[in-house]
């Protein structure tokens, strides 16, 4: 009898917890702040400046969602997470969403019970070698010593790739990117391998970047995107469509400078009108204001602008669009219709 | 003395020679060098070689350290400045320190409130006065030391002034129940009742009372969230709290481990062995990750508080073993002497055993303190911005990506200052407590 009462109480508590978790949007609105999980520091993607203001490519996604939901891109509480704490922070409810260069994999989606709401950066594992080695392809790396971060998927990808191509390598295990830079520059390894965006950012910090080349082979798929908890699809929809609004805005030519004019009155493009809230009730369907997309785009610009200001070719990181270009320009960025 | 010898001596001095200065080669810097550096050919060779090595190090390092890059705003600018100087081995990029030293000190604490952590640090030195330098500071200051934890917490986290006052009231409840119940009950029972009452007060009533009082009389300073703590301020907050709490807990654990009461002994041994058998990182993960899952959603159990509790428990277990070493070193006669004077257990501990045992353990205790303070850098693993975590975040800024040595040298230097002062203080304390048994 007592046991069943106890179990019953547990069930009620669990249901109550589930119910409270199901209304992330209400929680965020009541709090007036979005709790967004970001990396403790990754060049170009998230970093605090001297005044403690966060900026970066992942941070921009948080700001866009905060702007769409609360109308204020600065209404974000940035919760820094490490690779080890990020998933518990999300599943325990400490953060409402995670935008921390996290690769979308089946086990994370299914087993860890998260919902990936899209991809904001298509990455892949690459190789960097000193130019003086005269290597032009990863296929020529037989017998090389490779600096590799332990305990990451890059380690497994590397083993797979070398096995597939019948080559040998000698791993130099390292813990962090900072250590890797030092080891690589000191000549402890011939090759450094990590995500291509990380390689580009690392190379940009060298005194003579031109002495190092990033090989053309990309040996893995690393789609990085924001994610939310399972079980609150309304909230997942908001994050997903905010990201799509940024992508669609670039496709339609809406920028942070002209979004004010375009949203002032309904124009000739019906899809643009629907997205910017001058026609239809898409915002209402999401549970947001009619001008949610206007706010999201005003926060940091459209996807292309965010890319250009944080990691684009004009920045020290200097990444080209590549796979992350619009689908109309040969990339993979493709927003479903706003209808 | 026989006179055979006297006849062979032609001259005997009858006046004392005036005292002379010792030879120049045995006093002053020269004499010091001769006895310490150049006594014998082997030591001379060693001294010369070491001197050359130091000179060579300085020759290679100084040009790197003395680098006019304090005004630079990015690593590339540093490189331009150094490139213009045409130095063979490059130079340090100190711009990162001059731009970010405040962040390394205070984390993301709002700059207009920097005076609060600074004031708490100054007050900490005042509060420690009666504990560390008993003969120099008036004894009355000890009352301030007792209030200090509440003042410091209020200064650092801010909020309404009623929170610390309400928290102090809990201790007043314990004191009052001890005072009035001891006459009717067993003192231990009175203490337990007092603690239970205080816990009821803190958990059930204190929040409401503080809320009500602050609604009536809103006195307070701006509240600062724990997330904004960082840098050395975070390290010192965690370190100092853990250090101050771990000593009394450790002493109690050490005594409990020697207790004749089976339950007390088993609990103390179990606690000490469990905590010492687990790495600190694991405990920190429990604090940051596991508790998040176990606690009901929406519970706001401050992360810094969780970490402080874990670090304190960790340090207490080590402290207990250090103190136990001191207790074991005391001759049995001391215990028997205390018994023969008719002192009860607590009196003999307080007056005879502990003063001696703690004196023996000073080097071990201070080593544990220093270790705990340095261990606070581990919190960067659970994404708190201690100096090491911040150095990572600073490098993530595209302007400073690639700066290593300068940041680590700065952080190392500040840590060295703190740890070295602790170590010097322990030597001073040992000398002062020296009673000549050695």
Image: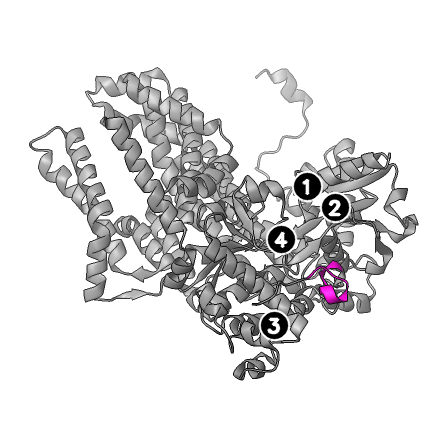
Q: CA distance from mark 1 to mark 2?
A: 9 Å
Tag 3's secondary structure? loop
Give residue B143's position: percent from left, percent from top: 25, 50
- Where is mark 4, residue-wise? A101
Residue at numbered disc 1: A153
| Gap in angstroms between the C-alphas marked 2 and 3 | 30 Å
**Relative to residue A96, is residue B372 depicted above or below?**
above
* Letter of the chain that mark 4 sits on in the rendering: A
Q: Is B281 within the magenta?
A: no
- The subunit letter for the residue under badge 2 reads A
Residue B317 sits in quarter: top left
Count residues near mark 3 (Cα–Cα under 10 Å), then give few for <14, some for 14-19, many for 20+.
Answer: many
Q: Position of residue B248 (x, y in %)?
A: 34, 35
**Which residue is drawn at the image coordinates 35% and 31% (left, top)?**
B251
- In this picture, residue B371 sits left or right of residue A129: left
Residue B320 falls in image quadrant = top left
């Amino acid at each position: 009898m007592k046991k069943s009462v106890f179990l019953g109480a547990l069930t009620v508590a669990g249901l109550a917890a589930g119910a409270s978790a199901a209304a992330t949007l209400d929680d965020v609105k009541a709090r007036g702040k979005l709790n967004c999980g970001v990396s403790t520091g990754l060049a170009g993607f998230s970093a605090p400046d001297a005044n403690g203001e966060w900026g970066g490519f992942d941070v921009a996604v948080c700001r866009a969602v905060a702007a769409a939901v609360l109308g204020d891109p600065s209404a974000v509480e940035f919760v820094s997470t490490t690779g080890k704490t990020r998933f518990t922070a999300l599943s325990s409810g400490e953060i409402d969403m995670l935008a921390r260069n996290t690769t979308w994999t089946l086990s994370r989606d299914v087993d860890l019970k998260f919902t990936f709401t899209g991809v904001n950066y298509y990455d892949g594992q690459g190789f960097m070698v000193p130019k003086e080695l005269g290597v032009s392809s990863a296929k020529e790396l037989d017998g090389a010593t490779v600096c590799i971060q332990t305990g990451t998927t890059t380690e497994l990808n590397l083993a797979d790739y070398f096995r597939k191509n019948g080559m040998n390598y000698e791993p130099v295990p390292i813990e962090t990117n900072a250590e890797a830079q030092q080891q690589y520059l000191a000549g402890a390894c011939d090759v450094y391998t990590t995500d291509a965006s990380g390689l580009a950012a690392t190379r940009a910090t060298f005194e003579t970047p031109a002495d190092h080349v990033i090989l053309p082979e990309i040996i893995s798929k690393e789609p990085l995107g924001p994610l939310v908890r399972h079980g609150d699809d309304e909230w997942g929809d908001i994050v997903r469509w905010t990201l799509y609004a940024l992508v669609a805005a670039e496709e339609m030519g809406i920028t942070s400078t002209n979004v004010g004019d375009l949203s002032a009155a309904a124009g000739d493009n019906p899809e643009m009108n629907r997205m910017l809230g001058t026609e239809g009730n898409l915002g209402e369907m999401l549970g947001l204001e009619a001008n949610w997309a206007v706010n999201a785009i005003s926060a940091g610009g459209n996807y292309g602008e965010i890319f250009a200001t944080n990691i684009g070719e004009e920045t020290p990181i200097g990444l080209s669009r590549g796979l992350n270009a619009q689908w109309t320009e040969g990339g993979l960025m493709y927003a479903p219709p706003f209808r | 003395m026989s006179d055979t010898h006297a006849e062979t001596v032609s001259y005997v001095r009858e006046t004392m020679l005036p005292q002379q200065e010792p030879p120049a080669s045995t006093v002053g810097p020269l004499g010091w060098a001769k006895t310490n550096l150049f006594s014998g050919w082997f030591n001379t060779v060693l001294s010369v070689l070491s001197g050359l090595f130091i000179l060579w190090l300085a020759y290679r390092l100084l040009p790197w350290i003395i680098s006019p890059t304090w005004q630079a705003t990015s690593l590339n600018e540093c490189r331009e400045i150094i490139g213009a100087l045409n130095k063979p081995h490059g130079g340090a990029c100190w711009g990162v320190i001059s731009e970010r030293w405040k962040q390394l000190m205070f984390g993301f604490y709002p700059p207009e409130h920097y005076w609060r952590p600074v004031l708490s640090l100054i007050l900490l030195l005042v509060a420690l006065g009666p504990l560390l330098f008993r003969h120099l500071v008036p004894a009355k200051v000890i009352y301030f030391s007792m209030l200090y934890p509440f003042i410091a917490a209020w200064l650092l986290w801010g909020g309404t002034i009623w929170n610390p006052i309400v928290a102090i009231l809990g201790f007043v409840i314990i004191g009052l129940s001890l005072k009035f119940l001891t006459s009717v009950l067993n003192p231990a029972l009175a203490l337990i009742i007092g603690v239970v009452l205080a816990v009821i007060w803190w958990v059930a009533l204190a929040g409401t009372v503080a809320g009500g009082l602050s609604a009536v009389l809103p006195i307070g300073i701006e509240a600062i969230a724990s997330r904004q703590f960082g840098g050395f301020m975070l390290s010192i907050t965690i370190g100092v709290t853990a250090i101050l709490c771990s000593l009394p807990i450790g002493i109690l654990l050490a005594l409990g481990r020697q207790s004749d009461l089976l339950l007390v002994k088993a609990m103390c041994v179990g606690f000490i062995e469990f905590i010492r058998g687990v790495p600190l990182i694991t405990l920190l993960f429990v604090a940051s990750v596991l508790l998040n899952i176990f606690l009901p959603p929406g519970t706001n159990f401050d992360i810094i508080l969780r970490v402080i509790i874990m670090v304190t428990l960790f340090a207490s277990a080590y402290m207990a073993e250090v103190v136990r070493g001191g207790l074991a070193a005391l001759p049995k006669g001391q215990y028997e002497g205390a018994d023969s004077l008719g002192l009860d257990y607590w009196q003999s501990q307080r007056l005879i055993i502990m003063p001696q045992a703690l004196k023996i353990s000073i080097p071990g205790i201070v080593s544990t303190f220093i270790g705990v303070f340095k261990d606070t850098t581990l919190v960067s693993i659970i994404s708190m911005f201690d100096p090491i975590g911040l150095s990572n975040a600073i490098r993530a800024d595209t302007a400073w990506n690639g700066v290593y040595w300068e940041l680590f040298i700065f952080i190392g230097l500040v840590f060295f200052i703190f740890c070295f002062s602790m170590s010097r203080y322990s030597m001073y304390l040992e000398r002062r407590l020296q009673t000549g048994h050695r």
